[in-house]
Image: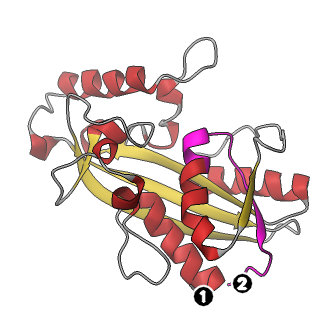
């Protein structure tokens, strides 16, 4: 494992919600985080079929364009009754014809698909959020970190916090959806903590422990 010595990182994302969450997680560690959106980098085409492949594509593109280490996240919602869908295509389910993303529409698509499968009880709506972080250096070296959190899909959506599918995901052992939690409650992790709740925080905890010694 390669340690990260630089204190400036590029967050390899154009997703405002994802950039905000990564900055929230990395800020306490003393990093300055620029984003691919801030730097006007072209979004690379995500041609991978796994979270690991797509995270690597994004991180390497930003690392090579900036000459700095870059941290990417590829994440999604995997629903058991839908054979793991939407999975790596989680964002695609929100895409409109004009290229914009509408996650209210995406959540309705998920609910419609579950009903078509007859998945109407809590035990038939199990799912997990997956996050894979990729830390890439300009020389092509990469490190990968995967985090998952189990839960279930609920309907109707609850809460206006977070982003994406957060209002319909209720993590196991909690009464609230991610959409009803504050950022601190959702992540459940800060440097030195033993636990982490969200998929992104769990992946980030592995990243911090491995590459930063945090």
Number of marks: 2
The location of residue 212, given as percent across then percent down, is 64, 82
**N-terminal of the two: label 1 or label 2?**
2
Q: Are marks 1 and 2 in contact (CB under 8 Å)?
A: yes
Check disc 1 and report the residue beneath it.
213
**Whether residue 198 is visible:** no
- Front-most of residues 146 and 192: 192
Which of 102/78 is in front?
Answer: 102
Residue at the location (44% across, 43% down)? 87
Give the left or right position of residue 174, taking residue 192 as reference.
left
Q: Is residue 198 left or right of residue 19?
A: left
On screen, residue 134 above or below 58: below
Q: Residue at the spot x=67%, y=74% of the render?
A: 30
The C terminus appears in which quarter of the rendering? bottom right
The x and y percentages for residue 52 are 59, 58
Q: Which residues are magenta?
A: 1-19
Residue tagged by mark 2? 3
Is 38 included in the stretch rendered in magenta? no
| Quadrant housing residue 179 | top left
> Is residue 2 shown in magenta?
yes
Estimate how packed mark 2 is, as few (under 14), some (14 to 19) or many (20 or more) residues with alpha carbons within 10 Å.
few
Rendering coords of residue 42 (x, y %): 82, 37
In the depicted structure, whether residue 79 falls above or below residue 27: above
As rendered, which of 84 and 64 lies closer to the eye?
Answer: 64
Element assignment for label 1 = loop
Residue at (65% x, 63% y) in the render: 134
Cα gap from disc 1 to disc 2, whole angstroms: 8 Å
Q: Is residue 72 visible?
A: yes
In the rendered image, the vertical position of residue 133 relative to residue 5, given as above or below: above
The residue mark sitting in front, 1 or 2, is 1
């Amino acid at each position: 494992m390669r340690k990260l010595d630089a204190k400036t990182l590029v967050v390899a994302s154009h997703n405002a919600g994802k950039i905000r969450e990564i900055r929230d997680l990395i800020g306490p560690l003393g990093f300055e985080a620029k984003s691919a959106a801030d730097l006007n980098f072209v979004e690379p085409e995500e041609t991978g079929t796994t979270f690991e492949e797509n995270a690597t594509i994004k991180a390497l593109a930003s690392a090579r364009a900036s000459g700095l280490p870059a941290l990417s996240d590829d994440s999604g919602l995997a629903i058991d009754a839908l054979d793991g869908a939407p999975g790596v295509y989680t964002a695609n389910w929100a895409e409109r014809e004009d290229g914009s993303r509408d996650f209210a529409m995406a959540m309705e698509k998920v609910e419609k698909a579950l009903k078509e499968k007859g998945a109407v009880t809590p035990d038939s709506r199990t799912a997990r959020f997956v996050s894979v972080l990729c830390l890439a250096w300009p020389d092509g070296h990469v490190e990968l970190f995967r985090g998952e959190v189990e839960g279930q899909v609920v309907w109707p959506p609850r809460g206006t916090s977070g982003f994406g599918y957060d209002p319909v995901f209720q993590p196991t052992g909690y009464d609230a959806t991610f959409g009803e939690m504050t950022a601190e409650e959702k992540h459940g992790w800060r440097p030195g903590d033993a636990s982490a709740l969200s998929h992104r925080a769990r992946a980030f905890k592995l990243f911090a422990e491995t590459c930063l010694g945090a």
